Image (cartoon, coloured by chain):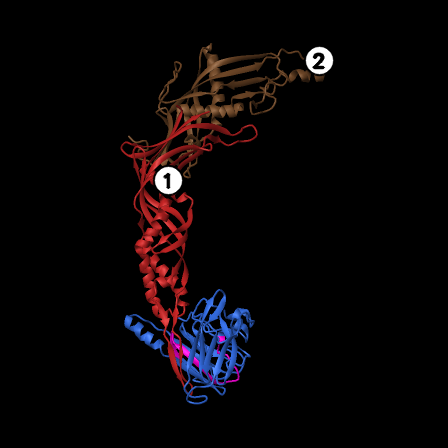
Chain colours: A brown, B red, C blue
Amino acid sequence: MSLTGTHEVFASIDEGALNAVLEAFFDARPRRRCYGSPIFVPTTTVDATEIPAIAFPGVPGGIGWRIGFTTPVVDLFEQTQPLPPGLSLEPGQFSLRTEVELCVNCVARKDVRGEAAVARSARASRPDHVVCAKIGVFGIGHLDVWNSPSGDGAVRLRVDRVELVDIRPDALETVLECVIKMILDGVLSTIELPLRALRAGAFELIVEEGPEIAHDCIQAFGNV
Amino acid sequence: MAQILAALDEGGANTVLTEAIASVPALSKSGSGSLGPFTASYTVHGHFTGGSIDLVAPATVRIEHLRCVWQMALSFGIDLDDFLPHFCLPQVCVHIPCVGRVCTPKICLSWPTIGVTVPFGDDVEASADFGLDVALIGGQWKVQIVVQNLSQLQFGPGTAGILALIGAAITPPLLVIPFIGPFLAGAVDLILAAIGIAGLTGFLGPILSPFLSGLKIPVYAQDKHFKLLPADGPFDPDVFVELDAVDARIEHSDEDELVLTVGISP
Amino acid sequence: MNASIDTFDSRALRYVDCYGQRFMREGTYRYHVLSCREQGLASQPARTIKVVPRSGEGKNGATMTQHSVPLRWTRGRFASSPVELEIEVGDLVLWNCPDPAAPAYEIVGDPAFFASTRLVNECGFTHAFGTPGSYAWADAHGSGLEGTVHVKEVACKTRGDLERWQQQLAQAALVMIADGKVRPHEVEIVTGQTVYFAIVTCGGISITDKRLLDERGGDGRAAVR
């Protein structure tokens, strides 16, 4: 069976190459997997992205927090990486595996009336007592693609479900899964990988079919 | 190995390679060669068009009817003594009244050498088997198809017309040569016959063959340090991957395909 | 088909031109063959013509002998043989240099009672016309004498045509110039034929292609190689 089938051009990137692309992306732009409120990330840099603290009454400056994750490792259907119970990889889907680290600045309130404003301000600008948790995360998602008749186009990974392991009680697990799914999907949806890059610049391709996940690859068919 | 793969069927290869052939920069060459009995200097420019692609596994791209469209400026000298009969103005006598008979001497002429410059152009066609050539040159991966076997050049029907052009170019400088008038038509015919179609193709063949036999048609060219994404603001620099290996081959299944594989790493 | 660059001028003789001069009195006459590049400066010793009385038929007899002096262009000079020529009164000397590579030249007597640049009495100038066209000529010295030579194209398609043409070439047209008149005023020849301009009596003229005069506004001689 030919690669091109009924089309003129076929292009594919296998899951190893896709993971190399993701690794290259997060290595070059580590801020895309590290976010923190000003107590952790005073300003956005290449390494980290500043996000607001969680505002809450009575907590001066809000709740300082940080979330980061390791570069996701993606497995394209058909499944080659193990998944926890409850997750299964269906045609057209990918799975991902990462480790999320969630940190909170756990402040013991020391604000005393009459404390000098300068001293209060200095204390508010550095972490007080940071507590962190690392959580293994598995996810399932699909490709979000667009392309145009001019040959432009891109794919992005969208996360549909997340499964955390060994979190009790189940309700907490559900809450955390929801939060982490939103965060991972939010992060990955900002990463658009152009089709040209996914075929390493080889041949022109006006997509007629795909890009889609199949045979451990993202593949597309079309004409020149 | 982490791999990107791209494949073209024959239809796609026809489109891609036809464009690639047309993108090959025009070739130029100057020199001299034998044009029949003459030594002619020339400057020639050529570019390529057309061709129908046949992919042959495991590593041959056959291009039929590959055309080289060329323009040439040809200059050569013609020693007319080689073509025209030895000619003398005979002794001429007149009778002058009251003086007598006066005669001029016989004056023998030598015919000059004339310079001819002829601009002309035509196309030449050939079929060639190309091999796939993959090389990392100066930090860039290049896949080209390179001529391995070239068929005999087939000159276009216009080549015969070139003789007529040469005849037209010869005529003006001949016209200004004194006493040539009665020999003019014969001189042009003799010169063109001396060149002949065989002389012309024998002249053009060695000039144009290297154009075709040295032809390299680009199929793929990318930096090894491949830019995946351009920078997007001060905190999002360029993203690169390394193209570690490139391979090109023709695969045969239910159809023939030109397959390019690229191994990458972060 | 007239793409002619064929011009003629008795003041600047070329390989298809002849200059002839009759010598009607006894004496020794010196002359120079000057390249037109020499602008009248003789760089070589003069040649001489010794004119002796006629040995028969009386003085200024109607029959005369022609003496041809072939000139050769060698090593940048004109050479002639013989250097000294002895002729009889009434004889004609005719000069020609058949070398196409030779520069235009003139025959200048010393003293200049005879010269190809100023044709006076009993002399002649011939020119073989190599290219078809109409050639108007005039006297560059301003006498007002003029005429036209019509040269017809010849097309030779067969060997017979060529032979007929060769036979035509052996016949010249004669133009007589005497007492301020040119007869005939116009002549018609075919390509390659010669016109003999016979100057019987004249105050000193040239036979000059009018195009040369037009180019130079009168003299025109510098336009000739």
Residue B133, label in figure: none
Residue with the mark numbered 1: B16
Give how far across and how far down residue B195 sits, in percent.
33, 57
In the rendered image, which quarter contains the N terminus of chain B?
top left
Say above or below: C210 vs B121: below
> Which mark lies nearer to you, 2 or 1?
1
Task: Relative to A184, say whether B6 is above or below.
Answer: below
Look at the numbered discs 2 and 1 and tell me whether their residues touch, using CB distance below 8 Å: no
Q: Secondary structure at mark 2?
A: loop
- Residue named by callout 2: A113
**Identity of the amino acid at label 2?**
Arg
Considering every residue shown, the one lying at the far front of the view is C55
Which contiguous range is marked in magenta?
Answer: C188-210
Q: Residue at x 36, y 71 (%)?
A: B88
How many numbered marks, from 0 up?
2
Image quadrant where residue A66 sits? top right
Front residue of B43/A201: it is B43
Disc 2: host chain = A
Front residue (pair C35, B161): C35
Q: Residues within 10 Å of mark 2 (few under 14, many from 20)?
A: few
| Residue name at image x 55 percent, y 15 percent | A103
Secondary element under disc 1, as helix, strand or loop, is helix
How packed is label 1: few (under 14 Cα within 10 Å), some, or many (20 or more)? Answer: some
Observer-nearest residue: C70 or B255? C70
Q: Chain of mark 1?
A: B
Where residue B217 sits: x, y (%)?
Answer: 38, 40
Above or below, comparing residue C190 to residue B84 in the picture: below
